[in-house]
Amino acid sequence: MKAQEKVIEKIADPARNTCRLCAPLGASTVFRGIENCIPLLHGSQGCSTYIRRYMISHFREPVDIASSNFSESAAVFGGRENLHTALDNVIGKYQPSLVGIATTCLSETIGDDVSLYIKEYNEKSKSDVPVVNVPTPSYKGIHTDGYRDAVISCIKTVSKENESGDFINIIPAFVSPEDLRHLKEIASDFKTDAVLFPDYSETLDGESWESYKKISPGGTLLSDIARIKSAKASIVIGSSLSRSGLSGSLSDHLPNSHFMNLPIGIDLCDEFFGAFEKATGKQLPEKYSSERNRLVDSYMDAHKYFFEKRAIIAGDEDLVVSLASFMSEIGIVPVICATGSDNPAAAEIIKKYAPDAEVMSDSDYATVLDKAKGMNCDLVIGSSKGFYLSKNLSIPLVRVGFPVHDRFGSQRIKHLGYRGTQSILDNIANAIIEHKQNSSNIGYSYL
């Protein structure tokens, strides 16, 4: 009987407020980063509604995500007709340059052959609109996996083998539109031609419109995606992009690739800019040397606020890995590093940067809270989901990453580079100071 109870307990141990989101959300973000592309989820309508809700509340932009809208009969007999009807509607109403199809758990579970359905549709409709298909069952991955697999599928489908060109690729993980704009600024300052893919810096943080547009302007040009395989070098930013997934591996499709973690903190920024110098054959512009020197100065200025503070870092694998390195540089001790991914390689990297931290993979915030009680933590660094920890532990939350629903301007948070690091450092210092002031009996104003 006790053995049966243990088995039941194991089966019934659900995730509570997970540190991850669904795989089709990541794929949809990539598709939003392609010019005149419309994402289409093959599955139930609720999946696209859930994703739109998350993206709109974070980016505060209109987000259209089509759905093949499974009914009970489609769930039993397959979604061929639903997908063909959805493609007719999407192509007819939006006139896209590309349709990006991401499968949901339901269509993957019943075994829909989406590649066959697309082939049949193209033969029947004679459509010349390219269609990219990426498998994104959330029971086999999370939003960062869906993001990576969509990037790979787009390159496999659209990019062509040509002679080597005099340009580089910049392939970032799931970062903010402001980060993407900063990466384009860096490429411009290096005076180099660069293909940034995906680029949702305008489609998910655009200007106001005088009249409604069916698809937000901006995004990586299809012609640029088509030449990705011809680049002289590729800079791939984020640990999650270095792994193979359901769509294969980026290293199989990118020339002369430099894989690295998100450039947050001096060490990782130095590595990033060093790779940029190597890839372009050009020296670091003085502008970034000055930013680095100011950042070093701020490390010293803020050390008295940071020394031996104890932090919980929770969120995307890419962000947690780099923040663990950054925290260790400035004297903050990461005591818990929690991610939604189940990646032993990422856990090893985190341990290298934060050897004394409790690394929690495939985790949820309720479990993190249970672990954090009694650990004397001073702050939480992560998305709005971390407010659950902040409120229950009565410590400040520094909001970074995705999703940030409860503050304004989350799409304009800069994380990357010396300048992004400076912004995060300032926010951490001010959160610690504000918490100290608010918890003081005298409320002093000079610290």
Image: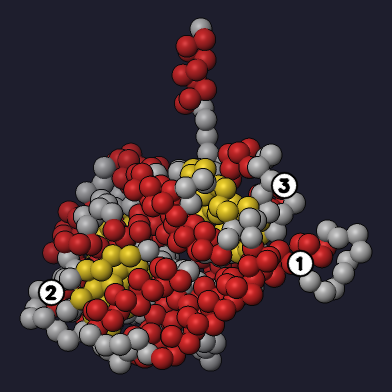
- Looking at marks 3 and 2 on the same chain, the residue that comes earlier in the sequence is marked by 2
Secondary structure of the residue carrying numbered label 3: helix
In the figure, is residue 186 to the left or right of 303? left
**Residue 167: x and y, percent?**
21, 84
Residue at the spot 26% in from the left edge and 46% down from the top edge: 112
Write down the residue under mark 1: 434
Write down the residue under mark 2: 160
Give the CA distance from mark 3 to mark 1.
18 Å
Secondary structure of the residue carrying numbered label 2: loop
**Residue 440: x and y, percent?**
86, 60
Up-down relation of residue 298 to residue 75 (above or below) = below
**Residue 12: x and y, percent?**
51, 27
- Amino acid type at circle 3 is Asn
Q: Hey, which quadrant is residue 90 in on the image?
A: bottom left
Secondary structure of the residue carrying numbered label 1: helix
Q: Are marks 3 and 2 in contact (CB under 8 Å)?
A: no
The residue mark sitting in front, 3 or 1, is: 1
Extreme residue in the left direction: 163
Write down the residue under mark 3: 392
The residue mark sitting in front, 2 or 1, is: 1
- Amino acid type at circle 1 is Glu
Give the CA distance from mark 2 to mark 1.
53 Å
Q: Nearer the viewer, residue 91 or 14?
A: 14
- Looking at marks 2 and 1 on the same chain, the residue that comes earlier in the sequence is marked by 2
The image's mark for residue 365 is: none
